[in-house]
Amino acid sequence: MKKENKTNAMRILDTMKLPYETVYYECDEFIDGVHIADMLGQPYESSFKTLVMQGKSKNYFVFVLPIAEEVDMKKAARVVGEKSLEMVHVKDIQSVTGYIRGGVTSIGMKKKYPTIIDETAQLFDTIIVSGGMLGTQIHLNPEDLKKAVDGEFADIVMDH
C-alpha cells in the first residue's frame, strides 16, 4: 500500500484531532473547482475554493467560498475591516501561502491570516476544500474547518 502524502493541512487536522477524509484525483495542472466537481460528480454548493486577498493595509486575508460563486469585494472588505481588497497575484500565491495555485487551502498557510468562510458552509455536514496540493481534497465539517483556521463565518458572496 502506498503511503499517503500528508500535506501541511492534513498534519494540522491530525494534530488538532479533527476528523476529515482525503480524496485524491488525477490532476497534472491547475483546473478550476467547477471542472473538478464535474469530474468527480460533486455538488458545487458544498465544494469550496480558497481566495487570498490583500487589503489597503497590506494585510492578507483568506476567503473560502463555494466554487461557483464570486466573492463580493465590498462585503468581504467590510467583514475584515478594510477599505478595499485586491486578489493576490498568481505569481505571489506560493510566497504568501506556501501552496501552489490549485492547491491552496486555508489550513496551514505559512502564516495564520484572518480567514472568512462563506456562511453557506454551515448548511452542510461536510464541505470539500483543497487538500494543500494539486489532485487532493479534504472533506470535513465546516465547524472543524473554522476551528482549524481560527476563522469566522460571514456572507461574502455576490447576491444573485
Image: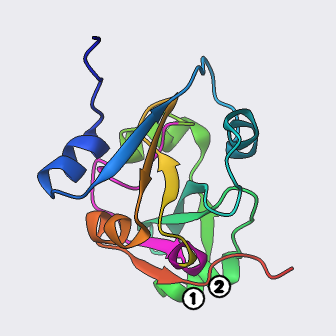
Counting from the top left corner in percent of width and height, residue 144 is at 32, 67
* Residue located farthest toward the top when viewing the structure as drawn: 1
| Residue for point 23% across, 58% down | 18
User: Is residue 78 located in the magenta-colored stretch of the structure?
Assistant: no
Q: Is residue 128 above or below residue 38?
A: below
Residue 115 is left or right of residue 79, and the answer is left
- Position of the N terminus, as image quadrant, is top left
Disc 2 marks which amino acid?
Answer: Lys
Asked if residue 119 shows in the view, the reply is yes
- Position of the C terminus, as image quadrant, is bottom right
Residue 63 is left or right of residue 71, and the answer is left
Tell me if label 1 and label 2 are in contact, CB under 8 Å.
Answer: yes
Is the residue marked by circle 2 packed among few (<14), some (14-19), or many (20+) residues within 10 Å?
A: some
- Its colouring scheme is rainbow
Q: Quarter-wise, where is residue 133 in the image?
A: top left
Identify the disc placed on residue 78.
1
User: Is residue 120 located in the magenta-colored stretch of the structure?
Assistant: yes
